[in-house]
Image (spheres, rainbow, N blue to C red):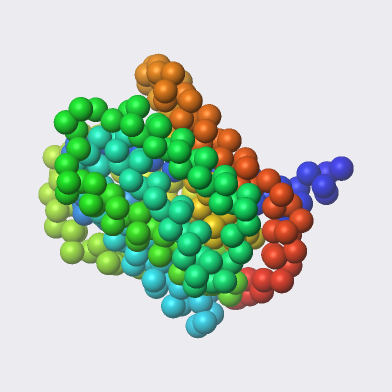
Amino acid sequence: MMRTAWNPRTLAAGAAAVTVLLWASAFVAIRSAGDAYSPGALALGRLAAGALALGVIWAVRREGLPPRTAWRGILLSGLLWFGFYMVVLNWGEQQVDAGTAALVVNVGPLLIALLGARLLGEPMPPRLVAGMAVSFAGAVTVGLSMSGSGGSSVLGVLLCLLAAVAYAFGVVAQKPALGRASPLQVTTFGCLIGAVACLPFAGQLVREAARAPLPATLDMIYLGVFPTALAFTTWAYALSRTTAGRMGATTYAVPAVVVLMSWLVLGEVPGALTLAGGVLCLAGVAVSRSGARGRSGRAAAREPRPEKVG
């Protein structure tokens, strides 16, 4: 019984759930820290905290350097997803309301599925397509219900769209690297590359940290340790055991979790339209992942396993 409960499929599902919960909490933390930190400074502070936490774990586990064949994917995902995505998303969330940002960024999973099929040769089974359509409808519903009048700008929408594109290309670049290196190696060095790419914002970070209130700085550190270091590692673990398209579809649960967190933690009671959108998001994720038991297991068996390095 115990062996069945902790099989790789169960662990991957648990890792995906941790990722969704922590990424949902990041929306609140970004909005809070963004009052005191500019987009680039917040991204650098977050990535520096994440790289430090990951570096300690990587050193303790003695996993060594990733193999040479994994570096292309790590470099691309580090620049696009860890670096560019975080700066542009922070900037976009300062220009538009949370509902509009969530709506536009949720184009990302659709792009991941299309790019995965095109560049990685991943299948797009009917259940995945149907589930993503249902979830996207739910994300649109949540976004529209949470959008405040006059809270959006053309620049903000374009920035969030750029973030979604960078997110999609970063995930697709990361997938092959996970066939050659461990999730911890891919996440640690991707985060480090992102932090190095954000070093031009170091001066801003020092100046803003000197005058920022303590809660904003703690939010930035939280973003680095949990939604970055922990959640990106659990994401990489789950992604290494399924397709990029199916993992992208899983993130459609984030808007529903954000609604629930706002209700429980902030006391913001969602309206009927918001609740309906959240239910659609979760239903779409359930549909997209149903029927994947046998197929994803066989696909995982055919994929190369991460190499043990160090």
Residue 15, image x and y in percent?
60, 48
Query: In the rendered view of the protein, which quadrant contains the C terminus?
Result: bottom right
Reply above or below: 240 against 285.
below
Left or right of residue 258: residue 67: right
Residue 288, image x and y in percent?
61, 47
What is the number of callouts on the image?
0
**62 or 1: nearer the eye?**
1
**Which residue is pictured at 82% across the width and 47% down the height?**
4
**In which quarter of the view is residue 37 placed?**
top left
Residue 287, image x and y in percent?
63, 42
**125 or 28: nearer the eye?**
125
**71 or 220: nearer the eye?**
71
**Could one spot residue 142 in this view of the protein?**
yes
Query: In the rendered view of the protein, which quadrant contains the N terminus?
Result: top right
**Which residue is pictured at 42% across the width and 23% down the height?**
273
Reply above or below: 287 against 47.
above
Looking at the image, which residue sits at the far right?
Answer: 1
**194 or 72: nearer the eye?**
72
Reply above or below: 216 against 273.
below
**Which residue is pictured at 83% across the width and 49% down the height?**
3
Left or right of residue 201: residue 298: right
Left or right of residue 35: residue 64: right
**Could one spot residue 59 in this view of the protein?**
no
Looking at the image, which residue sits at the far bottom?
Answer: 68
**In which quarter of the view is residue 211 placed?**
top left
**Which residue is pictured at 44% across the width and 18% down the height?**
272
Residue 269, image x and y in percent?
40, 16
